[in-house]
Image (spheres, rainbow, N blue to C red):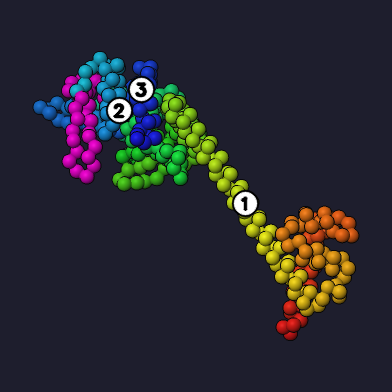
Amino acid sequence: MASYASQVKKELTSLEVHPEHARAELAALIRMNGSLDLVDHHFLLVIQTENPAIARRIYALIRQLYQIEARLSVQRKMKLKKNNLYLVRLMQHSELVLRDLGIIHGDSWLIQTKIPDKILNAEQRMRSYLRGAFLAGGSVNSPETSRYHLEIYSLHEDHNQGILQMMNHFDLHAKTTERRNGYVAYIKEAEKISDFLQVVGATKAMLSFEDVRIVRDMRNSVNRLVNCETANMNKTIDAATRQLENIKFLKNTVGFERLPEKLREIAQLRLDNPEMSLKELAEIVPSGAISKSGINHRLRKLSQLAEQKRQDLVS
């Protein structure tokens, strides 16, 4: 069964986008997963991914924007991970594409890792760039798991800061940390993860996330209520047990006949009804119903008398 993150990415790769938005998305995919190969004194652009749907997306965006046919190929990994590696190669016009997307500038063929201001200053481009960045280096936990977590990994710090800036433009409460020779912008709040999915266009995944989250949160609330009620019940039982022990102690040492009338009445009532709550006891006081706090006050008085008697016996 496909992971939740894979389901999100599958939905994102199926979105139809305006050419200007496609540029921002493609810029993120190339900036994060692209490299340059030197072949016969010419630079060739290579973008790699382990996800075939993302490889097809890159291929389609290049053809949509530049009417260029890239070359798709697949390599089998021979190391620990056995996943296929999908390569999109641009055999010609690499410079045209890279300059148009703002990935290289001037005479240098060095890929610029900083996100251009024209993206950072335009909300729709930010949405599209975040979509491409998530496809290239993002992951998200299933809402079924024990913790909520969405992240985008960047190799370069200035790129990570740009991702963080864009996330927080949409009030996503994103934070950042350094990890494994790179940087991560991440979100921990369930509501903000849902908002991120909506920002990048994963509407179906967002609705699915919300459905699971609501059920999970409701289940947790019920569990908390049950635990609270159980704790309260245990406290009530413990209190009643202590009251009975104190009353029996007084009966055996002092005798009920030496207690004040009101305390004697309550002591005998509790002894005869050990399982009842204070509220239930208050309603059946022989001399007339009293308040719950009245019952509690008299039982506390009995406990104080029992404690005093114990101290007298010790001394």
Q: Residue at x 69, y 59 (%)?
A: 236
Which range is magenta? 72-98
Seen in the image, is 308 located left or right of residue 15?
right
Question: Which residue position is annotated with label 2?
Answer: 54
Amino acid type shown at disc 2 = Ile
Question: Label 2: how many residues lie within 10 Å, few (<14), some (14-19) or many (20+)?
Answer: many
- 2 and 1 marks in contact (CB < 8 Å): no
Amino acid type shown at disc 1 = Cys
Quadrant in which residue 279 is drawn: bottom right
Which disc, if any, is residue 14?
Answer: 3
Q: Nearer the viewer, residue 146 or 175?
A: 146
Q: Residue at x 17, y 23 (%)?
A: 91
Question: Label 3: how many residues lie within 10 Å, few (<14), some (14-19) or many (20+)?
Answer: few
- 3 and 1 marks in contact (CB < 8 Å): no
Seen in the image, is 53 located left or right of residue 218?
left
Where residue 229 appears, as percent x and y from the top left, is: 64, 51
Can residue 220 be found in the magenta stretch? no
Question: Which residue position is annotated with label 1?
Answer: 228
Where residue 239 appears, as percent x and y from the top left, is: 70, 63
Question: Label 1: how many residues lie within 10 Å, few (<14), some (14-19) or many (20+)?
Answer: few
Residue 310 higher or lower than 124, as above or below? below
- Nearest to the eye among marks 2 and 1: give it: 1
Quadrant in which residue 6 is drawn: top left
Q: How many labels sit on residues?
A: 3
CA–CA distance between discs 3 and 1? 47 Å
Quadrant for the C terminus in the image: bottom right
Instruction: State which tag comes first along the sequence, 2 or 1.
Output: 2
Label 1: which secondary element: helix
